[in-house]
Image (tube, grey):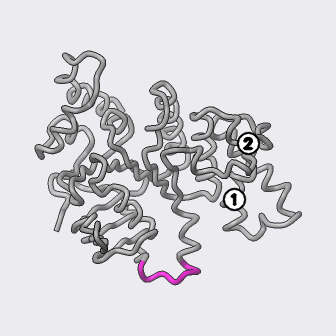
Amino acid sequence: MTTEAGTAPQTRRPLVELTGLRKEFGGRHGGVAVDDVSLTVGEGETLALVGESGCGKTTLTRLLLRLVEPTAGSVRFDGQDLAALAPAELRRLRRRVQVVLQDPYSSMNPRMTIADIIAEPLVTHDPAARGRRGRGPVRERVGELLESVGLDAGIQDRYPHEFSGGQRQRVSIARALAVEPRLIVLDEPTSALDVSVQARILDLLAELQQRRGLTYFFVSHNLAVVQQVADRIAVMRQGRLVEVGEADQVLRRPRHPYTRQLLDAVPVPDPRRGRRFRAAAADRGEAR
């Protein structure tokens, strides 16, 4: 079983516990996508899952969300085994776990206004938000959510195509916050954005986490982004976890050759700075 060897003792209460997870797909092009993965995510922390495309990150995320069923192993959220939940119980759990996807535009219905997009989780999970009586309070709530992510409450009646990529991602974050989740799964949330916009979105996520006590499961292939946000890093290769540890330890003193390969592949404007990446990342981690 893959363990978290080398990880500093956990002081946070576990919110998510993945135990012995395995996922096999059948068919001509099937195979093992996730192989014996065990991992915990502590309450209030940011755990980053990194690895190259095709390593199993997406499948592991879908298992965590119970969008696919595991071949073996279990997923527990706040002590509850997701496989044991009845449909009504799983529906209630959905509001405590929300997702922000890589491409904000493709995750929105272009025919829906910003107000309707953000209100959709509210209407889905809260009966009081439905019907005429709920329209006023919902619209007020949508305005509050827009302002919480740095957007003007007056944009509610506009459509996704009228906004930049960074603004649309802020709308996606506001939608995720609508039902007051405890965990947000961030699936490559900045990879479709310009570098300058990435920095602002990462700052926003950090501010929201501090203000709301959120837990983040941050999926990425970009260690240059991860080092800015992660408390711990889990490195995945070919469906297995090869290294899990505190962010500064993984970035500065990686134990697995594959982690070192990922670090060496981080693009920098001046190649001579590449050797100093791990030390700089560790310094920033100590300053957080």
Q: List the residue tagged with mark 2.
A: 159
236 or 52, which is in the foreground? 52
Q: How many numbered marks have been drawn onto this rendered protein structure? A: 2
Q: Quarter of the image for the C terminus: give it.
A: top left
Residue 84 in magenta? Answer: yes
Magenta residues: mostly which secondary structure?
A: helix
Inspect the image, locate mark 2, and give the three-letter code of the amino acid beneath it.
Tyr
How far across and how far down the image is residue 240, in percent? 21, 59
Looking at the picture, does residue 120 appear above or below residue 235? below
81 or 103, which is in the foreground? 103
User: Which residue occupies 29% across, 66% down?
Assistant: 29
Label whose residue precedes the other's in the sequence (2 or 1): 1
Identify the magenta region: 83-89
Q: Quick one: SS at disc 2?
A: loop
Looking at the picture, does residue 272 appear above or below residue 183? above
How far across and how far down the image is residue 220, in percent? 36, 45
User: Which residue occupies 79% across, 49% down?
Assistant: 140
Crowd around label 2: few <14 · some 14–19 · many ≥20 (10 Å): some
State the image quarter where residue 4 is shown: bottom left
State the image quarter where residue 1 is shown: bottom left
> In the visual, does 111 lie left or right of 39?
right
How far across and how far down the image is residue 256, in percent? 12, 46
Inspect the image, locate mark 1, and give the three-letter code of the amino acid beneath it.
Glu
Determine which of the numbered discs, if any, sits on residue 120 in the image: 1
Q: Quick one: SS at disc 1?
A: helix
User: Which residue occupies 68% across, 42% down?
Assistant: 160
Distance in Å between CA atoms under marks 2 and 1: 15 Å
Circle 2 or circle 1, nearest the eye: 2
Residue 35 in magenta? Answer: no
